[in-house]
């Protein structure tokens, strides 16, 4: 609170004078201003490199300089972005090379197709307003493994998923069921997907109706119609799958679970969420709502 007041009044009073009156240090104020923790010790370059390499190993090379910068600040280390960029560059610490993710879908079918209700409006105002779904494939030495996910667009959390050796309609209904049992939303959720046969299937449409959800599908040939879900798959592939050889489907399934449930949802800093993790972003939003005055 003291630092926030100092920031408001810094044009009116000299910084040393304000620090003396409020009994705080100039370095503490500057650490707060830079997003760090007041009172924390500034790391030397050698110390900072050790911490950066430790984080780099923990996240398996997933973070570039911006996410690394936010992670360092979140751990109480007041360090600037330009310094992080320099230290990473000089010490050969790089995020995994990004490959372009190619989305695939089977849209050549005669099943009914829903209208595009979402229309690329990817920022709902609250949780459980818009969910999205998609499928991708993972190579293993035993053959292909398929992953279907359901995301809540509000906090980009993967709230449901299903992993199977075949890409049949039950892979998407199982992922949807998991999401519904975890959230149990009120009726009216929009569920957006591509036009794939699994999503257009009668069994999937019946499941959506049972849950009181409304189907929405991307326009034909529109690669951006389900961009947030494809972005998740892009992160998954680049940060984990492309660098890993899976000897068995079981090993792949275990690694996918760890990436989704442990790393992506709970730890990975998301640029769209102001570099919070999905679960932290939702937790902060709920806390803010609880602090709002209740209507009489």
Image (cartoon, rainbow, N blue to C red):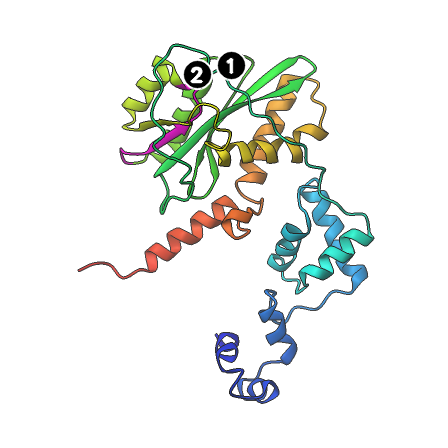
Marks 1 and 2, how far apart at CA = 8 Å
Residue 105: assigned label: none
Where does label 2 land, which residue?
198
Is residue 159 positioned above or below 16 on the image?
above
Q: Please tell me in which quadrant of the rendered image residue 132 appears.
A: top left
Image spot of residue 289 (x, y percent): 34, 55
Q: Give whichever of discs 1 and 2 has the lower sequence position.
A: 1
- Which residue is at a point 51% across and 47% down the rendered structure image? 272
Q: Are marks 1 and 2 in contact (CB under 8 Å)?
A: yes
Q: Quadrant of the C terminus?
A: bottom left
Question: Of all residues shown, which one is farthest toward the front?
Answer: 221
Q: Which residues are magenta?
A: 186-199
Image spot of residue 29 (x, y percent): 59, 75
Image spot of residue 54 (x, y percent): 73, 49
Where does label 1 land, which residue?
167
Question: Of all residues shown, which one is farthest toward the top?
Answer: 110
């Amino acid at each position: 609170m003291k630092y926030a007041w100092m920031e408001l009044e810094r044009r009116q009073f000299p910084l040393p004078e304000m620090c003396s009156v409020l009994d705080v240090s100039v370095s503490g104020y500057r650490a707060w201003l830079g997003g760090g923790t007041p009172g924390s010790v500034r790391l030397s370059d050698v110390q900072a490199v050790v911490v950066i390499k430790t984080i780099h190993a923990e996240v398996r090379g997933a973070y570039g300089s911006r996410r690394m910068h936010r992670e360092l600040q979140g751990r109480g280390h007041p360090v600037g972005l330009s310094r992080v960029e320099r230290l990473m560059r000089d010490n050969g610490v790089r995020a995994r090379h990004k490959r372009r993710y190619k989305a695939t879908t089977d849209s050549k079918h005669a099943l009914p197709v829903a209208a595009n209700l979402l229309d690329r409006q990817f920022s709902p105002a609250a949780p459980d307003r818009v969910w999205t779904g998609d499928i991708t494939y993972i190579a293993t030495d035993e053959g292909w493994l398929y992953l279907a996910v359901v995301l809540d667009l509000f906090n980009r959390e993967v709230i449901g998923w299903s992993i199977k050796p075949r890409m049949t309609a039950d892979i998407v209904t199982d992922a949807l069921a998991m999401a519904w049992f975890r959230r149990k939303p009120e009726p009216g959720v929009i569920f957006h997907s591509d036009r794939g046969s699994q999503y257009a299937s009668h069994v999937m449409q019946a499941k959506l109706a049972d849950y009181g959800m409304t189907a929405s599908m991307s326009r034909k040939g529109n690669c951006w119609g389900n961009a947030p879900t494809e972005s998740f798959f892009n992160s998954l592939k680049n940060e984990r799958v492309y660098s890993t050889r899976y000897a068995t489907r079981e090993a792949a399934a275990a690694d996918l679970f760890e990436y989704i449930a442990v790393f992506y949802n709970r730890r990975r800093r998301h640029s769209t969420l102001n570099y919070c993790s999905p679960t932290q972003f939702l937790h902060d939003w709920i806390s803010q709502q609880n602090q709002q005055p209740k209507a009489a």
